[in-house]
Each structure stands twice: as C-alpha cells, then as structure tokens.
C-alpha cells in the first residue's frame, strides 16, 4: 500500500508532501520535493480518477493545486480557488468521485463547536487543457457531528467516498497542542453524479457512527479503491501521529 500525506506547514521551504509505503509490515516514509508555487497549510490530497500520478491537493483557505507526481518530486501543473467560499471557511477535507464518466469534488468547511456546523460542498469538476481545475454549480449541505459533541469539535475533518458513493467523514475534537483529542468516523449520506454531470448529495437523517477514537485527532480518512478498508491518519500535535487501516467503507 502506498499513500500520499500532506503536511500542514506554512513557511517557505518546509516539507509539503510525503509518501508512506507499507510492504509486508515494513513502513517506509519518502519525503517528496515540491516543484512550483508553495502552498500554505495543505490539509487534503486526492488522486484524480482515470490518471496516473496526478493529484489535487487542498490548502486550508481554499486553493486547489493540480499536481503531477513522478519519483520523489511533486510538480504543480496549475492551481485555482474553490468556488463559493463562505465567510470564515476553513477547509480540512477534499474528495473526488467518478461516476457515469463524470467527475465531481466534495470539500467542507470544518465547522467549529455547537454554533458553527460544517458546510459540505459538492460540484462537478473538469480540467482545462492546461490543467487548471474548473468547478461547476455548487451544492451545499450543513452537517453536525453525532460524535464528538463539545466546544472544540470540528464536524468534518476529512471526507472520503466509497465505491458505492457513500460519504464517509472524520470528525475531531481538538482542545490544543497537548489535547485532549477525540474523533469519530461516520457514514453521513450518499453522492451521485449523473451522465449529464449533475451532482446530487443526500444527507442521512441519522448519520451512522462507524467508529470512535478517544485520545486521537483524526484528520485523514481515505476509502481504498475496491476495498472496504479505510486509511485513517491522525495529527495529535505534540503527541505525534498515527496511520492505520480499518474496515469502515463497506462497498
């Protein structure tokens, strides 16, 4: 298994991207060089379906970077802002879904405690000939986490979409660099993309909490292609971080 991991560094010259390779119990971490305009505070990355070595990476303020990864270098092809950015939006999550020969993107303002739910956005996606991401009409849905539920809750800390179109999200409580932390992964609804490119998001009336993770701050959730397994990544600040897999994505 090989996964790309973004680093939420903000200063010039700091590491932006790494590759984790897991092979028969041996974990290898490769630092990737970043070639192009440097982002501040990367929070999500997603492989572009139907391509080889191409990815979209999202920075917290809403810039999306189209990358081509070859060997140990990630080169910026182009970049663009997300559409319909709301006041105070802070993005930690990004997912792509391919259905019926069409492509769509999902992302979310993470929300903040009981007074600010997350806002889940979705839009059709295509690319200009020179590689710039181009977004279509935007759909918005509000979401409040069923767990955790406290003043430090980020209702959506990451998004992934299963092979059947289930929307799987992480939620995390972050009380500061020393914690305490708390997290959950939940099934919150369904996304479909029609042959005409229309994106429909249906939120569950009662989201299903698939797993809870007291003591950890989950900021990465990725359903593996063709598998029920999800890769989970934590950023536990001064307490370190972990990567593990769990069967949370179903079909």
Image (cartoon, rainbow, N blue to C red):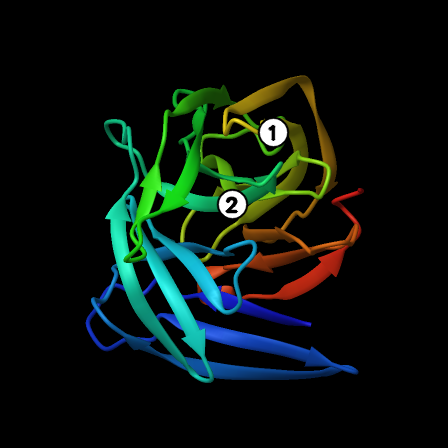
Residue at figure coordinates x 60%, y 19% from the top left: 202
Question: Where residue 32 appears, x then y in whole percent?
Answer: 41, 80
Q: Is residue 83 left or right of residue 191?
A: left
Q: How many marks?
A: 2
6 or 198, which lies in front? 198
Q: Does 20 sit above or below residue 97? A: below
160 or 245, which lies in front? 160
Q: Counting residues from the N terminus, which is met first, the one under dot 2 or under dot 1? A: 2
Q: Is residue 15 left or right of residue 5?
A: left
Q: Does 115 sit above or below residue 151? A: above
Q: Is residue 184 left or right of residue 114?
A: right
Work out which quarter of the rendered image holds the N terminus and state it. Answer: bottom right
| Quadrant in which residue 139 is drawn | top left
Residue at figure coordinates x 25%, y 59% from the top left: 40
Q: Is residue 95 visible?
A: yes
- Secondary structure of residue under mark 2: strand
Q: CA distance from mark 2 to mark 1?
A: 11 Å
The disc at residue 95 is 2
The residue that disc 1 covers is 191
């Amino acid at each position: 298994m090989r996964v790309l991991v973004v680093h939420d560094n903000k200063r010039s010259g700091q590491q932006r991207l790494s590759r984790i390779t897991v092979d028969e119990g041996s974990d290898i971490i490769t630092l990737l060089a970043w070639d192009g305009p440097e982002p501040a505070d990367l929070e999500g990355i997603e492989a572009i379906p139907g391509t080889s070595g191409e990815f979209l990476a999202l920075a917290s303020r809403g810039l999306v970077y189209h990358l081509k990864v070859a060997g140990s270098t990630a080169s910026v092809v182009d970049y663009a802002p997300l559409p319909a950015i709301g006041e105070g939006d802070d993005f930690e999550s990004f997912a792509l879904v391919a259905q019926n020969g069409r492509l769509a993107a999902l992302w979310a303002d993470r929300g903040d405690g009981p007074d600010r739910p997350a806002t889940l956005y979705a839009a059709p996606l295509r690319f200009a000939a020179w590689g710039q991401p181009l977004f279509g009409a935007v759909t918005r849905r509000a979401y409040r986490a069923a767990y955790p539920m406290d003043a430090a809750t980020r209702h959506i800390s990451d998004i992934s979409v299963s092979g059947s179109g289930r929307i799987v999200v992480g939620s995390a409580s972050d009380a500061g660099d020393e914690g305490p932390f708390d997290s959950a992964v939940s099934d919150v609804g369904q996304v479909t993309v029609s042959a005409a490119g229309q994106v429909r998001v249906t939120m569950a009336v009662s989201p299903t909490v698939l797993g809870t993770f007291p003591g950890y701050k989950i900021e990465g959730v990725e359903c593996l292609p063709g598998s029920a397994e999800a890769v989970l990544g934590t950023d536990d600040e001064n307490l370190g971080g972990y990567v593990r897999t769990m069967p949370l994505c179903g079909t």
